[in-house]
Image: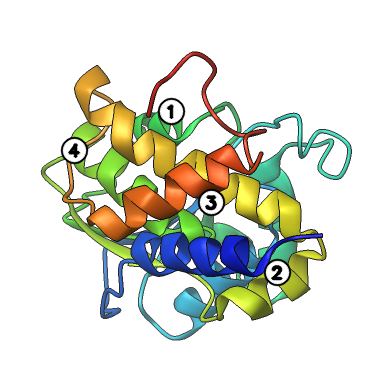
Amino acid sequence: MISTQAWADAQELWDYQRMGHELRPCSVAIGLGSHDLGVADVTADLYHRGLAPLIVFTGATSRTTREAMPRGEAQHYRERALELGVPAGAILVEPRARNTGENIALSRALLEERGVSVESALLVSKPYEERRAYATACKIWPDVTWVSASASMTFAEYVDSIQDARLVIDMLVGAQQRLMVYPAQGFAISQPIPQAVIEAFERLRAEGFTSRLIPGRVA
């Protein structure tokens, strides 16, 4: 059973980790691989709305996706986008990345290899990964203007879509830890974190939502 306080704390992290960017046309849309096929749905929708002429799906597999996406996250995203009517010629696949930094670095290398000029990019992720993905992208590829995008869902709606509340809260806590420790390691830009968010993170960690934490880190 998840306590009322834990739900409130998870909502605090959810609200902080959303960027609230206004969508606009960009050079490319980059869909970050994960267990959530909804990222592919959002990326396909952005393409159909004319907000990006080209899509890059990036991602290998992880412990949470190797069974559901045996051909790799990026490839499964591509197949989903094709089902949704995106032409094959508008999709590039980067199949090797195993973390967000590699998602950005390897997507950049692929686009440069194909001669694609990128001034701005729609960065498509799970809703609660918007801020961490943005912080990483700004660090790895700073001369691009990044616009965060994800499914327009409330926290409750997202939990209902995944059907695993503890997994979602664990992911929120893990994403928050990385926002707190990665800037010092050179993996992401630093961003202000409200005290209420820090306190919510600490309570959730103390309550046992720890499966996605980086071992041995204080934050």
Q: In this view, does 23 lie above or below 2?
A: below
Identified by mark 3, the residue type is Leu
Q: Is residue 85 visible?
A: no
C-alpha distance separating marks 4 and 1: 16 Å
C-alpha distance separating marks 3 and 4: 19 Å
Q: Can residue 130 be seen in this view?
A: yes
The residue wearing badge 1 is 102
C-alpha distance separating marks 3 and 1: 20 Å
Image quarter where the C terminus lies is: top left
The secondary element bearing badge 4 is classed as loop
C-alpha distance separating marks 2 and 1: 27 Å
Q: Nearer the viewer, residue 48 or 60?
A: 60
Q: Quadrant of residue 170?
A: top right
Disc ID at residue 189? 4
C-alpha distance separating marks 2 and 3: 11 Å
Q: In which quarter of the image is residue 213?
A: top right
Instruction: Check contact, mark 4 vs mark 1: CB within 8 A.
Output: no
The residue wearing badge 3 is 172
Identified by mark 4, the residue type is Ile
- The tally of labels here is 4
Q: Which residue lies furthest to the top in this view?
A: 216
The residue wearing badge 2 is 159
Q: Which residue lies furthest to the left in this view?
A: 143
Q: Does label 2 or label 1 sit earlier along the sequence?
A: 1
The secondary element bearing badge 1 is classed as helix
* Horizontal arrangement in the rendering, residue 83 relative to residue 137 (left or right): right
Q: Does label 4 or label 1 sit earlier along the sequence?
A: 1
Which residue is drawn at the image coordinates 50% and 30% (left, top)? Answer: 99
Q: Does label 2 or label 3 sit earlier along the sequence?
A: 2
Q: Which of marks 4 and 1 is in front?
A: 4
